[in-house]
Amino acid sequence: MDPVTWLTLIISIFIIFINGSVCYLFVSQAALKIKASNNLLHSLSVADFLSGLTIIIHILMIQGVINTEPLAVRLAADFFTTFTTTTVIVHLVVITVDRAISLFQALHYVNLVTKSFIKRVIVCIWLFPLLTTLVQLAYLYPLFQGEGNISMKDEDHIIKCEMWYSILIFIIYMATPFLSMGILFMAMFREITKLLRRTPSANASNRQQKRVLCIFGCMYICFVILALPYFALRLYIDIQAALDNEININETVYETLYVFKTLTSLCNPLLYTLLNREIRSIGRLWFSRRRQCFRKTLENISTAPMLLRSRGSADSGIHTTEIMMDQSVGDIS
């Protein structure tokens, strides 16, 4: 494997490990289940975990570990990549809207954003990207009929459909969300700044709101900087292919942008665990307990041979005493 592939593989392993740890933390710690909005972060960590798995699957396909001859395998990999990526974006949008509701409708937030409501929202978050991903089956049907062998007319039709599908996905999941999220973030920062000036007594809660906004703002900026260039390049490739134009793209540039895209699923859990005071404190407590249990286990393992040796020496001492007593009895008799 080349160095870029190795780097991508290492990043994907970290993505799976960190997001898997965050998922376990959300499942095992009851304190993180109190807030309804934390379920959104849990769902986002699952989406990032699946993104890491997708990257590893692609690497295995490139290296020939997974057989890519069947058409269904290649299409399933593409569908899964589109699905996980769009799901992460929808999560970021919903989390931003949740923060906006908590700020602009603070008095009614608890009644509006309940656990049952969040569960329904999470179902929609996963269902909507799934439906938009499966739309591709409508124009890829000739590929399945011909088992990959299709006429030139059908091939041209599929290429044009792919171009329009890429444009639609870019507008729905890239341009529109990030424009609306940018507007929301600016409005929220402005509102918090006003609250900090008007109500000095509530500075602590307002600063906490501002801190949370900074965390999700960083996640938003990371996704724009790291992921948007890759998807813009993919859109450019699809448009050039549909127009029968020659595609001259440096392979190193393409691979670098792909590596940057993978970093988004690593940045998300690091930002909302390391910068989130509540999750960080609960995580630290959980890790300290696990470390203590691990130390006790090691101490028990290390002291077990000593106990066996001391028990063995005690048993041998008793045995020697019994022999000496038997000998003394024999002498007397």
Image (cartoon, rainbow, N blue to C red):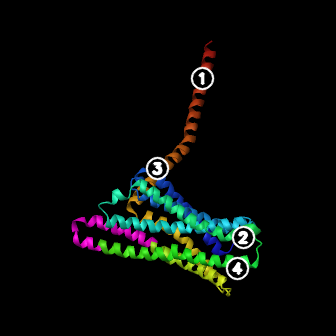
Res 63 visible: no
* Figure check: 168 above or below 23: below
The region drawn magenta spans 193-219
Report the quarter where the N terminus lies: bottom right
Q: Earlier in the sequence, mark 2 or mark 1?
A: 2
Q: Residue 203 lies in magenta, yes or no?
A: yes
The disc at residue 142 is 2
Label 2, label 4: how far apart the Cα atoms are: 12 Å
Tell me the mark number nearer the camera, choosing from 2 and 1. Answer: 2
The mark that comes first in sequence, 3 or 1, is 3
Query: Which quadrant of the figure has residue 184?
Result: bottom left
Cβ atoms under marks 1 and 4 closer than 8 Å: no
x and y, in percent, of residue 52 in the image: 58, 65
Question: Is any atom of residue 136 visible in this view?
Answer: yes
Which amino acid does the dot numbered 2 rest on? Pro
Residue at the disc numbered 1? 322
Nearest to viewer (mark 3 / mark 4): 4
* Residue type at tag 4: Asp
- 124 left or right of 74 in image: left
In terms of secondary structure, where does tag 1 sit?
helix
| Dominant secondary-structure state across the stretch colored magenta | helix
* Nearer to the camera, 240 or 15: 240
The CA span between labels 2 and 1 is 91 Å
State the residue lying farthest toward the top.
333
- What is the three-letter code of the residue carrying label 3? Gln
Cα separation, mark 3 vs mark 2, equals 60 Å
- Whole-percent x, y for residue 164 in the image: 60, 78
To which residue does mark 3 refer?
292
* Residue at mark 4: 156
Alpha carbon distance from label 3 to label 1:
44 Å
